[in-house]
Amino acid sequence: MSNLKRSNNNTKVEFSIENDPFINFRDKSPSRWILAHILNGSNKTNICIVLITTIIAAMLSSTLMIIVGETINDLLLGKESALLINILLILIIGIGAPLMRIGNFMLREVIAQRIERDTRKEFYLNLLGKSQSFHDQQKIGDLMARTTNDVRMLNYLISPALSLIIESFTSLIIPLGYIVIFYPPELVIIPLIFIFTFIVALRDYIKKIGPITEKLRGDFGEMNIVLNESISGITLIKSTVQEAREKHKYLMTIKGYRDAFVEQGKVQAKYVPILLLALMNTVSLAHAIILFLNNSMTIGQIIGYLGLLSEFRFPTFISFFVFAIIKLAGAGAKRLLELMNKKTEIDENLEGESRKIIGNIEFENVSFYYPGFKNRVLQNISFKIKQGQTLAIVGTTGSGKTTLTKLITRLYDVSEGRILIDNIDIRKYILKSLRSQVSYIEQDVFLFSNSIIDNISFGKKASFEEVRNAAILAQAHDFISSLPKSYDSEIGERGIQLSGGERQRIALARAFLVNPRILILDDSTSAIDSKTEDEIQKAINKIEENRTTIIITHRLSQIRWADLIIVLKSGKVVAQGTHEYLIENSPEYRKIFIKKFDLEEDKLITRSGRK
Amino acid sequence: MAFIGLDAEKYDRKYNDIDLFKRIYKYFRIYKRKIMIVVLLLTIASLIESFLPILITLALNSLQTGLNTQYLVTIIIISLFFNASSFIINYFQQINISKAIGNVILDIRKEANDSILEHDLSFFDKNPSGKIVSRINTDSQEFGRALELFMEVLSSVFIVIFYTFIMFFLNLFLSLIFMIMIPAFFIVAILFMKAARRRTLLGQRATASVNAFVKETYSGIQIAKTFSQEKKLFNRFDQVNQQSYKVNLKRAFLLNTIFPSLGFIQAFVLTLIIYFGGISFFEGSIPIGSLNLFIQGSWLLTFPIFSIASFWPQLQAGLASAERIFSLIDTNPKVIQIDNIKPKNFKGKIEFKDLTFEYEDNKKVFENFSLSIEPGESIAIVGHTGAGKSSLANLITRFYEFQSGDILVDGLSIRKYDLSEYRKKIGIISQTPFLWGDTIENNIRYCCKNASETDILDSLEKTGGSEWIDDLPNGLETNIRERGTLLSMGQRQLIVLARVLLENPSILILDEATASIDPFTETKIQEALEKVIKNRTSIIIAHRLSTIRHVDRIVVLKKGKIVEEGNHQFLMSKGGLYAKLYNTYFRHQSYEYLEKIKELK
């Protein structure tokens, strides 16, 4: 299996599952990839049955026409006795054809829905395996559009689009065959001419409608973006009195859409195949009448013949929209593959180190820049902390503090230099092993809209007792218990709203439960009331015990007692050391404090530092 | 079947059908001429379509009875002529119809968008943005399709009427047999539509729960990574995805049996027609060509009859869409101006007089609240969460309407000003800074289109320098992505501050962000503010307490009431609520606290 995986050059993933049958098709063309999905697993049998039932259904329909024609002939010949048999046949065949179709439709739906399910699964799995720097560049709206609409288009591609094409094809070919077999063969000429011109006209139509459909879709997307943005910025719009501008912006996009819509109507109105079909019907009738006059045809046969030609109505009318679907599905598949094939930098590294981490961290000349950007976000960072120590990072907005911490869990990889944990380059660890021993609590704590208990136990399956203990350690138990549904309270839009401090403590509980050797805390919430403040302090103190902690904070109380403080400015370490040392020696560091203490008349930390 | 995380959205019809039709008619009335043309063309096209089979009937009858070549040639020529004209008629019909629909959709979208932008903020509190967007963009499309549907059914009605008329003319008995098809189709259509709607709803819900799940996990991907829990997410995804598969497959199964079912009815009718037609033929009461017209009818009329039968249920879906948009448009704005006095420049006196305000019924934020702010005075509003601090800002800016009392600016009720002119004179920095997915330059320039680059750099300079912008990939030209996500919180605030400085308002309202900012940026913002609030009336809603020592007056709110006011020194020495708040907030920076924190367990 491992060999199979490596055979594809895009397989660097952070997460994968054992069984991925499409891995070798993703770097092929979209149609090849779709085909792989169509032919996957038990679909093959289904496809055979679909094909056979389609053909049988078309044959039954054509047979019905012939029999109707023969019945008319029998009437004209005065064969009264044949009537009952004839109508019995008509009834049986008339019911047989839709019966076939029911079976046919069911199976093609199974194939279609399966493709939707499987491609979505493939896509989702693939995105889970992409690195954080990949995800940073994605807009959620765009990812959603791909996961929902594009994937659904592949469903529509099978049913109705491809199924209808097969059906159209059989309802063109089979009547033709019947004409040749049952009627004077020259009758096939005019239908053949029709089919030929039909295909030419259809191609022309598709060429014209394609770009318009594309534009419509693009415009619709644009409409959503503009509207969404102006709703998000409504306060700003109102306070700066820019309603007119926003109205105008939206009006421009919907006008674009309207123009494309009218254009589409124009092209559709010129759908020539309908004219061709009508002309063919008349000319064929004339042709059949001529044959009748030459005594090579009966009236019943003319009726049967016209009946067979009426089968052409179906392909003529449905080709109209079928090709639009195919086009959309093709574009959808391309968009799915485009993302899935985007290279990502970080690998699961399944063969790597999985030892237990003690907690010594060393940065060796680490530099980092985002792929595609020249500016270095971090430059030549070096520092060392021992197990169990606490490192505080301070610095201005945008100085690279958060980026620095994200390098440790390999959300991004260093561009230059290296990071060692217990003297081993972090890139040598199995990714899962590294991440499960290093916890990261982000600045804007993300909670799933699940129950509190689910959120706390997100990192590890745990009993209720364990969850409760973790919550107690994180000072979250009290406020959780005060909620009406306690630990089962749902968080989010449909549930309770938590304050920043409460969210942070839930995140801390989540970390307590995993009990990582290294904890990174991007701490930026400020609590106004003293109770919350104390609780957060308590929780942070608790979690710093017995583990290496890296904390980004402006809480002086945290900075003050850190074993090492590094001061970042524009991606560089401008000073590092303990509080006492920095107060004496770093003007940068002093600047933070002196400003603060202007406010406090008498209780200056600066003094406490010199104590 | 239980769905993971999604129940049906409750939706009550508020409008009755007649009102709805009247209202929809208003939109289409503008394009009355186009629509009349379409209806006319459509009638002709339907006549031709019903008439063409008669030509074949005539031809066949003449073949049966005796030969008249010229007669046959005429029939063929007429038929060719009809077919060609039918195409041309159809062409004009289509073009007119898409113009009418395109414009109706445009009109309703414009109207809806215009109206929501005029709504006050209480509207946006009630309607999440996803709902508004889908109503304006998607429901409008459905609404436009109602016309298409209507035309389609009109054409079907014409065809069915013309064709049955011909049939009745040819043979009464067979026509009656043929008529069985109509009620049978109706029954099938109604039965299926009912079941289909239910299944479709279930299908949509299942799809929606997949979407909701996926959306959330994309947002939280970093958490999954840092905890190595991708497998967990994947398994849950697999579950909802599989559920959606099952439900949607069931739905598809049902929908796919509709047409075969019609096929059964068709087969029965055809059998009956041929049987009784055959007998009539032997009796000599019907010529062969006419019998053929009945046989053809069983195929030709299938779709027209079905589209009539399914019209009503389909229309209901369209009406629901229309109603969703109308209810958006019809929401009554609560903020209403009673005059449109255009202020020149405000001196900046603000008075709250006996103000009563509530967001929701019976949850009063203010009751008999009074406060007077002098021109040029800077005041800070301080208090616990829920004391009503931000509500003050929301009221002065007229984002929300108050229930009683009054707010006066320069001695005149703010209800009397022209809203646009009024708001232009007031600068507000809201708690969560909003930025466009655009360049920094354009974000700063948002209020004032004509500002030069120097103006922009100037206002940035006033926020304490723009060196940090030079560190960005393209400086001022850097696109900061959706909502400014490329920047940190502190940076976003600096941009917003620069924007307001460029606007240079007479009254400034600053609703501080609650998330704290690194000490360096914090200092910068403070210094900038000190300059900004000089010589203009400023209200600072202070959440962080670090910005307010230099204001003229501090107002301490508690549950919508003023409990203390005065400057910093005065309030500190008083030792009341302010002193308590202040000490709490800065306690973690005080020496005693630092020592104590070590023992805090």
Image: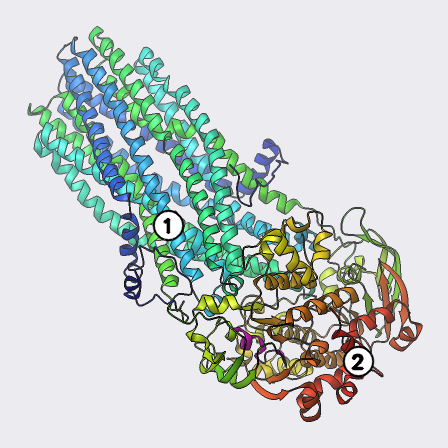
Discs 1/2, front: 2
Residue B548 higher or lower than A14, as above or below: below
Left or right of residue B376: residue B183:
left
Which residue is at a point 59% across and 36% down the rendered structure image? B20
Looking at this view, is B502 or A550 the one in front?
Answer: A550
Residue interval drawn in magenta: A389-406
- Tell me the SS state at disc 2: helix
Circles 1 and 2 on the same subunit: no
Residue furthest out toward the bottom: A585
Residue A100 higher or lower than B493, as above or below: above
Counting the numbered discs, the total is: 2
Left or right of residue A424: residue B470:
right
Residue A335, percent across and down?
A: 38, 59
Residue with the mark numbered 1: A118
Label 1 neighbourhood size at 10 Å, few (<14), some (14-19), many (20+)? many
Residue A196, percent across and down?
A: 17, 45
- Tell me the SS state at disc 1: helix
